[in-house]
Image (spheres, rainbow, N blue to C red):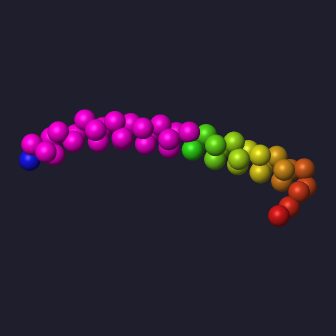
Amino acid sequence: MEFVGALAPIAFVFAVAALSQVSTLKKEVDRLAKEVKDLDSRGYSS
């Protein structure tokens, strides 16, 4: 059980890093969605 307790700080660091990556990914998805909307309004279609 002590082993699991020793891993807790490492798991926390990885969790914080993952949240940061998710935030960055969300910003990129929002930017791409805006770009698609702009292209759609110009009459481009897929």
Q: Is residue 41 magenta?
A: no
Which residue is painted at 74% across and 44% down in the image?
34
In the rendered image, the vertical position of residue 40 relative to residue 10, given as above or below: below
Q: Is residue 13 magenta?
A: yes
Question: In the image, which residues are magenta?
Answer: 2-24
Quarter of image, res 9: top left
> In the rendering, at what x and y percent does residue 27 appear?
61, 40
Of residue 20 and residue 39, the one placed in the foreground of this image is 20
Of residue 4 and residue 22, the one placed in the foreground of this image is 4
For the stretch drawn in magenta, the main secondary structure is: helix
Which residue is painted at 64% across and 43% down in the image?
28
In the rendered image, the vertical position of residue 39 relative to residue 12, given as above or below: below
Q: Residue furthest bottom?
A: 46
Which residue is painted at 28% across and 38% down in the image?
10
In the rendered image, the vertical position of residue 37 relative to residue 14, given as above or below: below
> In the rendering, at what x and y percent does residue 26 appear?
57, 44
Q: Residue furthest left?
A: 1
Q: Quadrant of the C terminus?
A: bottom right
Quarter of image, res 7: top left
> In the rendering, at what x and y percent does residue 15 appear?
36, 41
Image position of 28 (left or right of 10): right
For the image, the number of numbered tags is 0
> In the rendering, at what x and y percent does residue 25 appear?
57, 44
Which residue is painted at 70% across and 48% down in the image?
33
Image position of 30 (left or right of 10): right
